[in-house]
Image (spheres, rainbow, N blue to C red):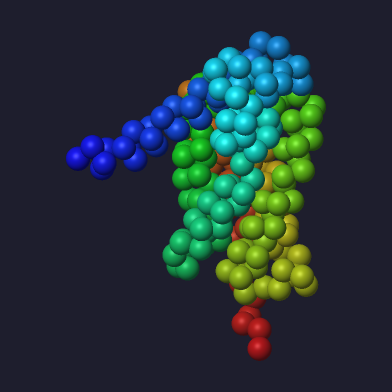
Amino acid sequence: MITEDRPGLRERKKQRTHDDLQRVALQLFTERGYHDVTIEEIAAEVDVSPRTFYRYFSSKEDVVLGSVPEMVAATSAALAARPRTETVMGSIRAVTLDLVSEFASDVEANRIRTGIIAASPELQQRSAERQPIMEAVLVPFVAERLGMDPEQDLAPQVIVSCTVAVTRAAIERWTAHGSDRGLAETIDEALALVDAGLHSITPADPRP
């Protein structure tokens, strides 16, 4: 029985350390600014080594923006699992809602996080640099579902660019003005506007 309990205890300790590092980092970023806080200071506040910090986060920006590999893997897997009977935007909205709810379930922490991004030109730049990475995941999915060539047809890139843009707009509005609703619901409202404008785009004829 003791042997069976150990892995569970180990995982709980790891999760606690992860959460403590993130909580302390967000607090320090809010108080002093993202640029003026070091990884060494974050680790010291949690009474762990910088090496331990890197076991949980590959960089300081990952504490705020999240891990790119994790988001790419989660998005790719979630899109692949959606039923083919769904519309393209129906799948994107469902996946986005699920992922945002999972990765940003703590409303207050997420509001703090988005506030830190808004106050940091460095993080805004890093966030913008991640946009093409997510587009590279979405464009092939949209093209395949519409029976289009992502290299030749413009529609998949336009749809994805609109999707990414309105998602960013929803996050910025939610951060600046607040809402009784969660971030996921605000983003879904924005995606619904894109969805409403896509009804004139029909799947291409199957290519030979």
Q: Which of 14 and 104 is in front in this view?
A: 14
Residue 188 visible at all? yes
Where, quadrant-wise, is the N terminus in this rendering?
top left
Residue 63 visible at all? no
Note whether 168 is above or below 90 in the view shown: above
Task: Work out which residue is located at the far left of the displayed protein and give it.
Answer: 1
Q: Which of 188 and 31 is in front in this view?
A: 31
What residue do we see at 66% from left, 17% from top? 41
What residue do we see at 45% from left, 33% from top? 14
What residue do we see at 77% from left, 70% from top? 151
Q: Where is residue 173 in the image (x, y as percent from the top left)?
A: 64, 28
What residue do we see at 38% from left, 35% from top? 10
Note whether 193 is above or below 47 in the view shown: below
Looking at the rendering, which quadrant does residue 168 occupy?
top right
Looking at the rendering, which quadrant does residue 7 occupy?
top left
Q: Position of residue 46 (x, y in %)?
A: 54, 18
Q: Nearer the viewer, residue 169 or 95?
A: 95
